[in-house]
Image: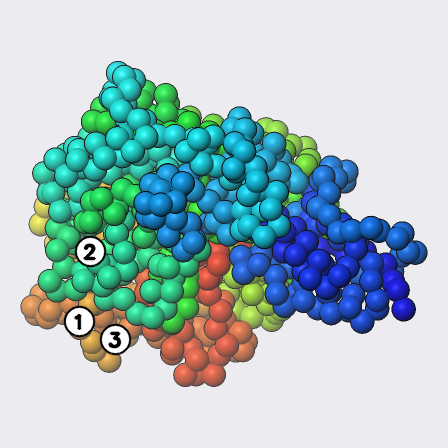
């Protein structure tokens, strides 16, 4: 029996060769009809016998392109229309955009083979791509995803490229960024005066020579600029640090191939898969003892952040260099990465010696993603290239369109449409005008891309966050969510959890409902809302925000709680008597000395007390170095602590922990073992509170759970005690996940005030 069906497909089905796939499949089965893109996804109409149409529908699901994602497929039966053939039709622009914009995808093997084939017309062409790889999110203007709605619209395809584009048997059939040396973008090597030194292959060859000579190159890539130097050249690395004002923060590295990575780092099967994945993130890997990368690349750090080449240009460069390079974000410190060549010259001319640029416009900045393997699973630490803006599906949809503006550090924004939450790429810390403009620009482009005019905007509870002020200043209907509640809700949303459950949020700082600084928090969640059930004992931070960098001030506040006026006897040696006296008076007179229950600040204070460091140059540095002390050391020991009750809320009193920790130090116990004992104590606290709250499900979130030792040990001990444990995987545990939690708050608890 002949039948006509209409198939509506939603998901990541644009920019992945989905229409060519449908076209080939339909023709192989002898079906007639058409396929087209629309702003919601892909529409297929097909006519044939009932049995063949059923096979067609099932094979769409089973044989779809590997990088596609079908979220919803609906089949309708329609009257016969007597189609003559099967065709790809022009996109239908009607309706509100709801299709998924695919992230930028690393160069596939077929394209890599062509790039290095001297007989291929794309030999050494830096912009080679096909339906299986290449730019997507960084070049799209609007949906549906067609060439004329991308930054490739300025490049008219030559005869040969157009023939590929129109050939159903070619893997470039309807590949929107399709290009070649004849018709596509090209590279040029510039100096700081914008003079063109060379073009095309000569520019790449001269860049390779310049890197080998120790020069700093600003390289325009896929989602912005990299700053590149030879990783083995200590002088070049130090010059880059000095020019960029990046004192100790680790640099990311790019290696030519997986074999060269294995020569320097330990690489598990899971880590290798992640490195070689289409997302191609920076992966944190353990250095080998004989690693050739100098310490200057990642000071005092046993891990290296490494990625493989993910664009043709990177592949060509790395093939010529045959050595690892530093490939750090091309920006002035604390500003967004540059995406346009003239902007790069203006901002990076005092950092870089030469500029390898190209004329394919970048529509939005997209940093490299960062990930690591925890408990044999991928955990994303920075969600950007390769992952954004893929949606998170939550189990509580909204009729209203919601915009979440995230936090202040590691900012991301998100919009919700139904049960889909579209999270932006990593924006960064909102510390200056440039970052604020980037934040506003990302919101505007998100609204434009998805045709969303938010009815509700959700922000952090902190009234002084720039993102919160943006919400209040620009929208009438706003909601605010406590920072650590958002952290836990990001796990609940990501894993579609249902309460009751215990949520644990440990991080540096967040504005609490009692107007103190929170960060060592335990919440019980159920279908009616949440309640703070426990937190660590408070201590003061003399100097306020200055204590976040001058961490000896956090130590002073902590030790004051333990020793009172005798605190001065227990301070690190490099704190002067005059300053100690001033800090003491600040605490006693409550001058700029806010109270905190922050686990992040507790980590800082312990690092200071142990003499690891007294000031940090980037967020989390002291806590990282404390964690790294655990490498190669083990102990079952821990410190004793007390739990008191404050109006029904458990308070974890760390007083004895600090006293015994100091005793261990004074008795010359290895600082490595002290660190292990401290971490073990934190794990014991987590399990202890979990038993007291007595809910089967435990959700872990917050920046402190980027600490691999803490996270893995907590998971293992909780599981050993019968708990089901969940943690952030696809969304960062740090503040990069806050925007998802903010939307989840409104989705789950919009009636809770």
Which residue of the protein is positioned furthest toward the right in this rendering?
A: 79
Q: Which residue corresponds to mark 1?
A: 632
Mark sitting earlier along the chain (2/3): 2
Specify how the rendered protein is coloured: rainbow
Q: Nearer the viewer, residue 533 or 267?
A: 267
Residue lying furthest front in this view?
A: 119
- Label 3 environment density (alpha carbons within 10 Å; few <14, some 14–19, many ≥20): many
Disc 2 or 1, which lies upstream in sequence?
2
Q: Mark 2 or mark 3: which is in front?
A: 2
Locate residue 267, reporting x and y percent.
27, 66
How many residues crowd mark 1 within 10 Å: few (<14), some (14–19), many (20+)? Answer: few
Sequence-wise, the earlier of marks 1 and 3 is: 1
- Please tell me which residue is depicted at 39% across the width and 48% down the height of the picture: 114
Residue 63, x across and y down, in percent? 61, 65
Residue underneath mark 3: 638
Question: Which x, y percent locates residue 578?
Answer: 13, 38
In the picture, residue 2 is in which quadrant? bottom right
Q: Mark 2 sits on what residue?
A: 301
Q: Residue at x 63, y 68 (%)?
A: 62
Would you identify the image quadrant in which residue 95 lies?
Answer: top right
Nearer the camera: disc 1 or disc 3: 1
In this image, 544 relative to 83: left or right? Answer: left
- How much space separates mark 2 and mark 1, taking CA atoms? 14 Å
Residue at 31%, 26% (x, y): give it: 199
Residue 251 visible in this rendered orientation of the protein: no
Foreground residue among 324 and 460: 324
């Amino acid at each position: 029996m002949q039948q006509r069906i209409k198939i509506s497909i939603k998901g990541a089905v644009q920019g992945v060769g989905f229409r060519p796939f449908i076209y080939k499949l339909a023709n192989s089965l002898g079906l007639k009809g058409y396929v087209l893109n629309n702003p919601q996804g892909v529409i297929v109409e097909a006519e044939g016998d009932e049995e063949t149409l059923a096979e067609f529908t099932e094979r769409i699901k089973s044989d779809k392109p590997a990088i596609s994602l079908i979220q919803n497929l609906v089949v309708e039966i329609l009257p016969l229309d007597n189609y003559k053939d099967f065709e790809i039709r022009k996109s239908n622009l009607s309706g509100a955009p709801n299709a998924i914009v695919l992230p930028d995808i690393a160069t596939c093997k077929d394209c890599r083979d062509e790039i290095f084939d001297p007989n291929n017309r794309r030999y050494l062409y830096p912009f080679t791509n096909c339906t299986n790889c290449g730019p997507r999110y960084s070049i799209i203007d609007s949906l549906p995803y067609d060439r004329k709605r991308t930054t490739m619209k300025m490049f008219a395809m030559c005869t040969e490229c157009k023939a590929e584009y129109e050939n159903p048997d070619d893997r470039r059939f309807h590949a929107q960024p399709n290009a070649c040396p004849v018709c596509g973008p090209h590279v040029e090597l510039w100096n700081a005066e914008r003079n063109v030194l060379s073009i095309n292959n000569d520019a790449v060859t001269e860049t390779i020579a310049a890197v080998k000579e120790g020069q700093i190159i600003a390289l325009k890539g896929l989602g912005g600029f990299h700053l590149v130097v030879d990783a083995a050249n200590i002088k070049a690395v130090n010059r880059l640090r000095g020019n960029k004002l990046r004192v100790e923060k680790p640099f990311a590295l790019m290696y030519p191939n997986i074999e060269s990575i294995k020569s320097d780092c330990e690489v598990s099967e899971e880590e290798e898969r992640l490195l070689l994945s289409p997302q191609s993130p920076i992966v944190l890997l353990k250095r080998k003892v004989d690693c050739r990368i100098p310490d200057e690349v990642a000071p005092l750090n046993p891990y290296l952040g490494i990625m493989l080449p993910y664009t043709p240009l990177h592949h060509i460069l790395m093939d010529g260099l045959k050595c690892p390079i530093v490939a750090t974000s091309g920006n002035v410190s604390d500003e967004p990465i540059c995406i346009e060549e003239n902007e790069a010259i203006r901002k990076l001319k005092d950092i870089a010696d030469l500029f390898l640029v190209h004329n394919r416009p970048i529509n939005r900045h997209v940093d490299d993603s960062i990930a690591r393997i925890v408990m044999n699973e991928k955990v994303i630490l920075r969600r950007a290239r390769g992952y954004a803006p893929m949606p998170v599906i939550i189990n509580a949809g909204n009729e209203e369109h919601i915009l979440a503006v995230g936090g202040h550090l590691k900012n991301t924004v998100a919009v919700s449409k139904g049960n889909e939450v579209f999270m932006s790429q990593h924006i960064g810390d909102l510390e200056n005008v440039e970052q604020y403009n980037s934040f506003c620009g990302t919101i505007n482009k998100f609204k434009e891309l998805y045709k969303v005019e938010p009815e509700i905007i959700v922000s952090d509870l902190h009234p002084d966050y720039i993102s919160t002020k943006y919400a209040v200043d620009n929208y009438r209907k706003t909601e605010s969510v406590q920072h650590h509640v958002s952290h836990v809700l990001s796990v609940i949303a990501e894993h579609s959890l249902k309460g009751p459950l215990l949520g644990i949020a440990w991080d540096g700082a967040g504005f609490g409902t009692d107007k103190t600084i929170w960060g060592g928090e335990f919440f019980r969640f159920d279908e009616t809302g949440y309640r703070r059930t426990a937190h660590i004992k408070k201590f003061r931070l003399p100097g306020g925000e200055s204590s976040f960098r001058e961490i000896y001030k956090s130590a002073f506040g902590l030790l004051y709680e333990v020793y009172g006026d005798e605190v001065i006897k227990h301070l690190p040696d490099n704190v002067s008597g005059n300053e100690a006296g001033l800090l003491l008076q600040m605490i006693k007179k409550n001058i700029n000395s806010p109270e905190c229950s922050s686990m992040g600040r507790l980590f800082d204070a312990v690092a200071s007390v142990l003499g690891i460091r007294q000031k940090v140059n980037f967020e989390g540095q002291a806590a990282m170095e404390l964690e790294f002390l655990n490498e190669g050391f083990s102990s079952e020991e821990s410190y004793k602590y007390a739990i008191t009750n404050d109006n029904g809320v458990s308070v974890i009193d760390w007083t004895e922990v600090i006293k015994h920790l100091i005793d261990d130090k004074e008795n010359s116990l290895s600082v490595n073992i002290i660190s292990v004992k401290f971490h073990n104590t934190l794990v014991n606290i987590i399990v202890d509170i979990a038993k007291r709250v007595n809910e089967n499900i435990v959700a872990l979130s917050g920046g402190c759970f980027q600490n691999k030792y803490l996270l893995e040990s907590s998971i293992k001990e909780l599981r050993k005690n019968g708990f089901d444990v969940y943690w952030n995987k696809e969304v960062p545990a740090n503040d990069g996940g806050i925007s998802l939690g903010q939307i989840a708050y409104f989705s789950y608890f919009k009636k809770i005030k």
